[in-house]
Image (cartoon, grey):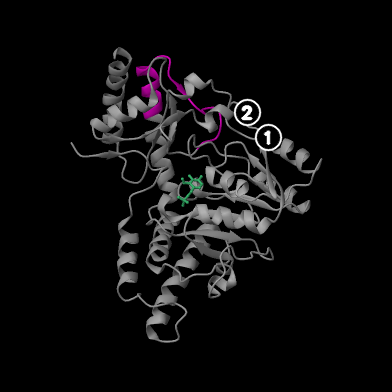
Amino acid sequence: MSFLYLDYNATTPVVPEAREAVLDALGAGFGNPSSDHEAGRRAKAILETARTRVAAAVGADPARVVFESGATEAIHHAVHAAGPGVVLASAVEHPALLAAVRARPDRTLEAIPVDGSGRIDPDGVLRRAGAGVRPALVAVMAAQNETGVLQPVAELVGPLRERGIPFLVDAVQQAGKLPLDFEAPDWLVVTGHKLGGPKGAGALVVRDGVPLPPLLDGGGQEGGRRGGTEPIPAIAGFGAAIDLVRRTRDDEAKRLRVLRDTLEEALLEALPGARVVGREAPRLPNTLSLLLPPGADGAAAVTALDRRRIGISAGSACHAGARHASRVLLAMGIAEEACFRAIRISLGRDTTEDGVGRVLEELPAVVREIRGA
Ligand code: PLP
């Protein structure tokens, strides 16, 4: 039995188009794009092709795309650019955002609550933004990595801009799976390894006229917005992957939604007492966040499935030897005990009906096994 990978929200296999682009960049494209000779120009051409591809996929002008090492750096960069003050962020943001704010003593984090389905209330955000201390930044992710729940980002872009409040949107999970159906925020974050590219390249897309002082200054690369010689192979792979996504995303979304819904319905039937997280909300088509029935621990199910060569992830995280309930699920009002029963199954390009069938066969058996243990 081959290994069945169902953890696409963690990272994705590198698509052949990206692999080829990486190899080409490692070979003929080895030069430094800042060099004034043939090798440099070849590297520069690869860099600019990737920039154009990223720009096309997110609906921006290429000049607005700044390459970074990934989303974590891009988020830190946007928080840096926003300047000191209150950062109003959804309670379900990625830890990179929380860390970026906490690392700076002149920033304070204020959480935007989510409801039981995992969604923020845009009117509540606008009310808060207009009252009390004016936020230096509002940060709301487009799609949540654990639950797949989509946020009403489109309803915030215009009103926040009218009020002159900078807006950061982490579109890491949505970019590979659904179109970005909202106007450009001040800063938009995407990353290559979540959409079929290699690790090591992502982008911060900056709205026209919005300043972006460098986080690390150096040789003036990326229009003086990010110092450091660009990692051309990773960027080339990112560009090739996002180009493929742009062309195939709609069909893939339809295909994955059918597979996910089939899996979801069959698991709810096979596992009485199980519950789907965020089912009432608009969600990514590939993500299933499931609370297993009482008595079935999520981390134990992940381990047991791994023994059966199926890779998924648990809703709890292990830090320094202690297990913690997911901050995201707790913010949705889910009891701590139930959070420990959470698993996440995330589908992608290589997922087939057969793969879904394998989960349907193995997961109920695993749940019986761990409840009986
Ligand atoms: N934001 C979201 C929503 C994510 O899922 C991730 C990946 O875990 C990140 C940010 C960080 O991305 P990267 O690994 O490119 O730094």
Label 2: element kind: loop
Near-viewer residue (82 or 14): 82
Q: In the figure, is residue 114 to the left or right of 52?
A: right
The three-letter amino acid code for the residue at tag 2 is Asp
x and y percentages locating residue 99 in the rendered image:
56, 46
Alpha carbon distance from label 1 to label 2: 8 Å
Q: Quick check: 231 left or right of 127?
A: left
Number of residue marks: 2
Residue beneath the point at 44% across and 82% down: 35
Q: Which residues are magenta?
A: 263-283
Does the magenta-highlighted stretch encompass residue 265?
A: yes
Determine the secondary structure under disc 1: loop
- Depth order, front residue of 103/178: 103
Residue found at the very far right of the displayed protein: 131
Q: Are marks 1 and 2 in contact (CB under 8 Å)?
A: yes
Dot 1 surroundings within 10 Å: few (below 14), some, or many (20 or more)? some
Residue 107 versus residue 297 in the image, above or below:
below
Q: Quadrant of residue 362?
A: top left
**Residue receiving disc 1:** 121
| Left or right for 125, reference 320 | right
Q: Is mark 2 within 8 Å of ligand 1?
A: no
Residue occupying the point 31% across, 18% down? 370
Q: Which residue is mark 2?
A: 115
User: Which label's residue is closer to the chain start, 1 or 2?
Assistant: 2
In the rendered image, residue 147, in percent from the top left (x then y), is placed at 49, 34
Q: Is residue 184 visible?
A: no
Q: Amino acid at mark 1?
A: Asp
Task: Decide: is 181 above or below 302.
Answer: below
Q: Position of residue 187 (x, y in %)?
A: 62, 56
